[in-house]
Amino acid sequence: EAGVVQSPRYKIIEKKQPVAFWCNPISGHNTLYWYLQNLGQGPELLIRYENEEAVDDSQLPKDRFSAERLKGVDSTLKIQPAELGDSAVYLCASSLAPGANTGELFFGEGSRLTVL
Amino acid sequence: QKEVEQDPGPLSVPEGAIVSLNCTYSNSAFQYFMWYRQYSRKGPELLMYTYSSGNKEDGRFTAQVDKSSKYISLFIRDSQPSDSATYLCATRASGTYKYIFGTGTRLKVLA
């Protein structure tokens, strides 16, 4: 079974340019997460989706970041315009609804962004 | 104070050693505990997923949770150079989607 798929793996852009990352979660996982991971740090949540609905976007910098999950499967995270401080790894993850025997969080390989 | 504290390392051990990786947490509501392995330039890979206190073993890996002291551990027996990676602990409360991660411990197993 395929895991969480992300693209692109690497992206280098100049500041003020736009960038978009794509994620395809594990089949059957209704919950999708976008995390930000800076060097030497653990992942930090940007946004969580339940199907098509963004149910937790409190940590998403909405002035420049946006996300969508059309049809409740694939998701796209966009940054416009990018700033130098946005250089990081953007991780997509998915899970079943957290319950007594579920709730494991599975990550993709990440999209590494470098802003010059 | 961070909700989950983890020593960043790096931790260097000789091949074959028993490795002990640890995290502490502050919120007694946390019920589920995870360990992830992250190789350089890769995404985190789930190693262990445990509920409440006790031990869970999977091959050379043992996860241990002590809720009374809010302390979680991952033991790696017979460590191999291929175990060299960053190990992240994570936790969440029951019924929530909020996963809290440690900063990760870099482990290097020397051949």
Image: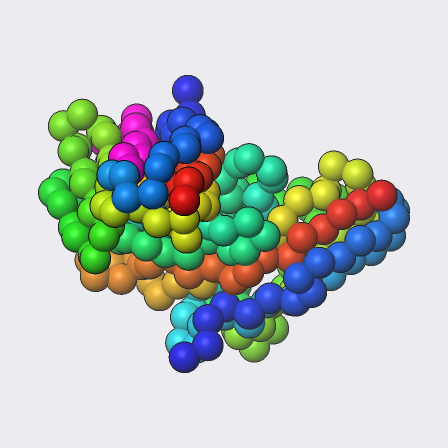
Q: Position of residue A78 (x, y in %)?
A: 72, 57
In the displayed structure, B85 sits above or below B19; it is below
Q: Position of residue B34 (x, y in %)?
A: 31, 48
Q: Position of residue B13 (x, y in %)?
A: 36, 34
Is residue A48 in sight in this rendering? no
At x 84% / y 52%, what residue is drawn?
A13
Is residue B6 in sight in this rendering? yes
Q: Where is residue B1 in the image (x, y as percent from the top left)?
A: 41, 20
| Magenta region, residue range | B19-28
In this rendering, position of residue B26 left or right of residue A18: left
In this rendering, position of residue A18 left or right of residue B45: right
In this rendering, position of residue A27 left or right of residue A63: left
Q: Main secondary structure of the magenta part?
A: strand
Q: Which colour scheme is used?
A: rainbow
Return the residue nearer the eye: B42 or B60.
B60
Q: Is residue A25 found inside the magenta-colored segment of the image?
A: no
Task: Specify the farthest residue to the front.
Answer: B111
At x 18% / y 25%, what residue is drawn?
B69
Please identify the quarter of the rendering in which residue B59 is found.
bottom left
Q: Is the C terminus of chain B in the top left, top right, bottom left or bottom right quadrant?
A: top left
Task: Specify the farthest residue to the top.
Answer: B1
In the displayed structure, B62 sits above or below A77; it is above
Please identify the quarter of the rendering in which residue B63 is found.
top left
In the displayed structure, A87 sits above or below B58; it is above
Return the residue nearer the eye: B23 or B98.
B23
Return the residue nearer the eye: B32 or B11.
B11
